[in-house]
Amino acid sequence: MVLVAEPMVGLESAAFSFMIPAGTIYEQPSQLGTSSLMCDMLLRGCGSRDSRQFLADLEILGVQRGESVTSAHVSFGGATVAENLEPTLEIYADLLRRPHLNPDHLPAAQQVILQELRAIEDDPGHKTMLELRRRHYPDPWGRNSEGSIPTIEAASMAQVKKHFQSYLRPNGAILGVAGKIDWPQLLEQVERLFGDWQPMPEPTIALGATEPPQQHVTQDSAQTQIGLAYNSVPFRHPDYITASGAVGVLSGGMSARLFTEVREKRGLCYSVYASYHTHRDRACVICYAGTTAERAQETLDVILHELKRLPGTVLEEELERLRARVKSGLIMQQESSGSRAGSLAREWYHLGRVRTLEEIGAQVDALTAAGINKYLVEHPPQSFTAVTLGREPLQMPA
């Protein structure tokens, strides 16, 4: 397991972020959602603590915690006052290495995931984005972390335990820590807690086929949801900063192009944005718009027009607004141990190293409109995956 940490002068808090390589890409196709079930059950008792005592001990320590399941990882993180970091890591060592995984808790964990899946049906925008990622990426990289209602209902305790025993391992795991820390003391504690954790063989992930790139989901609604995706370079690519800058011109503020052209000037939709989404070896730009059924086709046409006219048209004033947004984010990260701990772990996963905030700022300062335009001319938005949800399908241009 890799430990990467950064002292943050002036803070009284400390935060941690575990990234464990046990996400949805490791699930069997007939057992989708196993990672989320396991993640929930890990929180229901470990070591000497039952479910109630586990939560009570974290509350006494003042830990603000969070968990997530992604394609590659099951992640656990939290922040607390610096003096409580050591006992907090003791608890999470039990969670990762000595969970109870009590079969009596499986029905409750299933109900939690089933409620999340049913909530997606009431959130058409979220439903559209899940289907978009599933179609854009080859299986297993586009999977929904919650799985499906049939696979969760059919889940067994045996498959949850097998997933834990097969994939919760130290090799590939990353622990990021940031805040008011003492490095020698932290290193000694992590070695004591995890030093004898035995590695396991690295699983091989076989890529499946992608589905047809255009799909309409029929739903009787006055609204239409539009999702578009096109390939980009992953986070570890040398052009990532430039590619991210291009997305920042499209979206990220009230002066960004999609907001201005689609919502402000034409009043076509109530929500529109673009975002950058990355795995380790593949990435895409995702665009979303929610609009009325009557204006859906025009909304789609205008978004595609803005995407296609982007190469060669980025202005320096747009770049200046982007720089201001990014630097505001960097300043806030300097003031948040939790944000920085998560960044440390993610950057180690993607880059095998950690950039300083000053290095990131220098990369942003080095961006030029000419450089972004050159990148876009060489990598124009094209070969779109499109998912729409509403009454009638929309027409994609040839």
Image: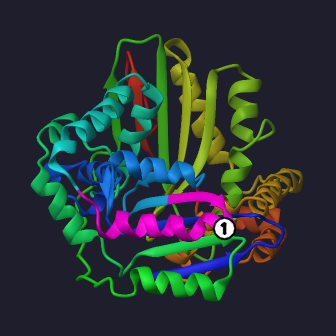
How are the colours assigned in the image?
Answer: rainbow
The quarter of the rendered structure image containing the C terminus is: top left
Residue 359, placed above or below residue 106: below
x%, y% of residue 275? Answer: 59, 48
- Does the segment drawn in magenta span residue 391? no
x%, y% of residue 242? Answer: 69, 66
Mark 1 belongs to which amino acid? Glu
- Does the segment drawn in magenta span residue 97? yes
Residue at point 46%, 59% (across, down) = 76
Residue 372, placed above or below residue 311: below
**Nearer to us in this view, 64 or 230:** 64
| Left or right placement of residue 391 versus residue 77 in this view | left
Residue at point 81%, 70% (across, down) = 361
Answer yes or no: is residue 68 visible. yes
Q: Which residues are magenta?
A: 77-100
Residue at point 61%, 85% (across, down) = 185
The local secondary structure at tag 1 comes to helix
**Nearer to us in this view, 202 or 338:** 338
| Left or right placement of residue 271 versus residue 300 in this view | right
Residue identifier under label 1: 83
